[in-house]
Image (cartoon, helix red, strand yellow):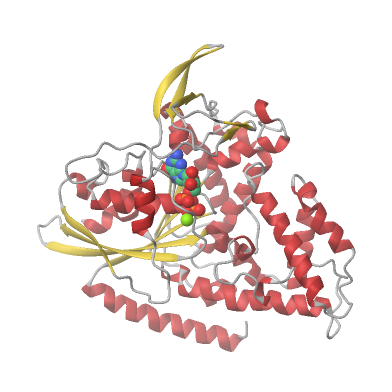
């Protein structure tokens, strides 16, 4: 970015901040970002939160509701006309009436809620809560803004050759070996390279491997850009210190990488990310534990990248492009209902360990950060099953129809009880770099993996006089209190 365009950005942001500040004086607004990698639980979280607020769910820790200060919660037309609306009505129907998990979304979307409440001094007020759902994959693109195509290529190729990734990258790497970067640009070579590279990224995301750190984010979550030239590029193996010959494949790939940064990455950070006030980052910690130590390390790397986006006052190119104004960030381990409650605190401790390591690695300062283990929707109840060592704390629920355990498909109609495995008391043992700390599915051990978390169907609800009640949850109220409870005082 040139100096002039940086200056222009700064001026534009300052003008906008002033305008939004003025607006905020009349109607207080919180823009709450909900992010997380695909399948972390964003859609379920937003649906359960909105449904719970509108139906007056059981939220003892969410103070304004518990104290009866919330008079009404309603949906309102959103602020931005060009952003898709979060499809709340369809998602809630799926979850509550049809007892199936909502369809996954691959886009940014918004939903506006108006909360009428009585302030602590007795006055009636309305808080506007703008909920913004966006793919966490897109946050992982931030580092690309500071990297040339050549740097990114070298790093991506090196990364693909190490650890678990190597075997998954074979088809792409063998193609790469046949590509001459200084040959004349050829669209069909670019398409094939992008296809194989995307295939490699997708294989890494597969639940057996559950890798997290996989930029460019739009290759996995294209939004509305699938198939466009800005997404049709891939790393090349390049001679060091040289410049691409005019008209070469290398030159074309570099141009597309640069467009990706300009037309995709920068607008996202400027138009959406920079406007958030509060943020929850949903993390499927259990999926990483399921997959094994490599996935846990990879998730750790992704957390560092994510925190980098929220760093205030880091200077340089990022701050010229946007100033994060998020004042509170909550990292949440989702799907805690896959564990017996005796393990909820342990799950929180595991994520807490990862987040504090990421905070020191990223040299993070800025927002207030907290960590929680939650289930936006509780799909299970608890019980005990008899095992070899006596009675084991287990969870009971209806297995999702497509669920398999150690490659055996469930064909049961009724409920099942599962012992999901014990999380370690000392979270540190999971991150010991000197040992393969535990066994996961990526190791190919299937049945002997240390943890195996089963997917359940959403819970059955008892009909009440005026429809279906709010969904059961675990600690959703604590998350709400942290994220916007203070704005309802
Ligand atoms: N048991 C349980 N499963 C959940 C919960 N949240 C998400 N899931 C599961 O995770 C899947 C992905 O969730 P979704 O909200 O679509 O993820 P997104 O891609 O981040 O929007 C769902 O289809 C459910 O199977 C939860 O609170 N409890
Ligand atoms: Mg979603």
**On the picture, is 434 further left or further right than 239?**
left
Residue 119 or residue 228, whichever sits in front: 228
**x and y percentages locating residue 342 in the rendered image:** 43, 26
Residue 89 location, x and y as percent?
A: 33, 57
| Viewer-proximal residue among 299 and 202 | 202
Residue 382 falls in which quadrant of the image?
top left
Q: Which quarter of the figure has residue 434?
A: top right
Which quarter of the figure is the N terminus placed in?
A: bottom right
| Residue 19 image position (x, y, % from top left) | 33, 81
- Residue at the far left: name it: 122
Q: Position of residue 33 (x, y in %)?
A: 42, 61
- Give me the residue at 87% from left, 80% from top: 184
Q: Can residue 333 be seen in this view?
A: no
Taking the spot 47% from the left edge, 25% from the top edge, the residue there is 416
| Quadrant housing the C terminus | bottom left
In this rendering, is residue 67 above or below 224?
Answer: above
Quarter location, residue 379: top left
Is the residue 315 above or below the residue 367 in the image? below
Q: How many labels does the image show?
A: 0
Q: In this view, does 402 lie to the left or right of 191?
A: left
Residue 155, placed above or below residue 272: above
**Does residue 286 appear in the picture of this structure?**
yes
Rendered residue at 72%/35% (across/down): 443
Q: Which residue is drawn at 52% across and 72% down?
A: 268
């Amino acid at each position: 970015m040139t100096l002039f365009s940086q200056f222009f950005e700064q001026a534009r942001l300052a003008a906008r901040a002033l305008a939004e500040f003025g607006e905020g004086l009349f109607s207080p607004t919180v823009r709450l970002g909900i992010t997380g990698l695909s399948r972390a639980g964003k859609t379920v979280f937003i649906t359960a939160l909105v449904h719970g607020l509108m139906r007056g769910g059981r939220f003892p820790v969410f103070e304004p509701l518990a104290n009866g200060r919330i008079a009404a919660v309603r949906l309102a037309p959103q602020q931005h006309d060009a952003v898709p609306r979060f499809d709340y009505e369809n998602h809630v129907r799926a979850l509550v009436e049809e007892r199936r998990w909502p369809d996954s979304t691959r886009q940014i979307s918004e939903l506006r809620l108006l909360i009428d409440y009585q302030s602590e001094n007795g006055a009636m007020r309305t808080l506007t809560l703008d909920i913004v759902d966006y793919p966490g994959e897109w946050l992982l693109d931030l580092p690309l803004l500071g990297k040339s195509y050549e740097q990114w290529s070298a790093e991506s190729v090196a990364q693909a050759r190490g650890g678990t990734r190597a075997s998954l990258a074979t088809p792409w790497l063998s193609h790469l070996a046949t590509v001459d970067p200084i040959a004349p640009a050829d669209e069909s070579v670019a398409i094939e390279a992008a296809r194989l590279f995307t295939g490699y990224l997708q294989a890494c995301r597969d639940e057996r491997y559950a890798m997290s750190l996989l930029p460019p984010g739009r290759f996995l979550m294209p939004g509305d850009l699938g198939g466009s030239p800005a997404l049709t590029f891939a790393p090349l193996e390049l001679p060091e210190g040289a410049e691409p010959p005019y008209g070469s494949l290398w030159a074309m790939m570099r141009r597309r990488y640069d467009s990706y940064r300009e037309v995709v990455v920068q607008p996202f950070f400027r138009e959406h990310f920079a406007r958030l006030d509060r943020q929850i980052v949903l993390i499927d910690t259990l999926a990483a534990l399921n997959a094994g130590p490599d996935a846990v390390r990879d998730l750790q790397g992704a957390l560092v990248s994510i925190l980098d986006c929220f760093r205030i006052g880091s200077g340089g190119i990022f701050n010229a492009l946007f100033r994060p104004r998020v004042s509170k960030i909550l990292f949440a381990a989702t799907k805690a209902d896959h564990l017996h409650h005796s393990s909820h605190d342990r799950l929180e401790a595991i994520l807490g360990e990862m987040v504090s390591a990421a905070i020191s690695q990223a040299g993070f300062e800025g927002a207030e950060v907290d960590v929680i283990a939650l289930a936006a929707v509780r799909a299970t109840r608890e019980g005990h099953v008899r095992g070899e060592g006596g009675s084991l704390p287990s969870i009971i629920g209806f297995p999702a129809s497509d669920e398999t355990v150690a490659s055996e498909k469930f064909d049961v109609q009724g409920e099942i009880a599962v012992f999901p495995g014990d999380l370690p008391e000392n979270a540190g043992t999971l991150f010991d770099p000197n040992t393969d700390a535990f066994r996961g599915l990526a190791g190919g051990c299937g049945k002997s993996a240390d943890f195996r978390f089963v997917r359940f169907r959403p819970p059955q609800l008892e009909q009440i006089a005026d429809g279906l009640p709010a969904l059961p949850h675990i600690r959703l109220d604590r998350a709400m209190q942290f994220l916007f409870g203070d704005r309802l005082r």
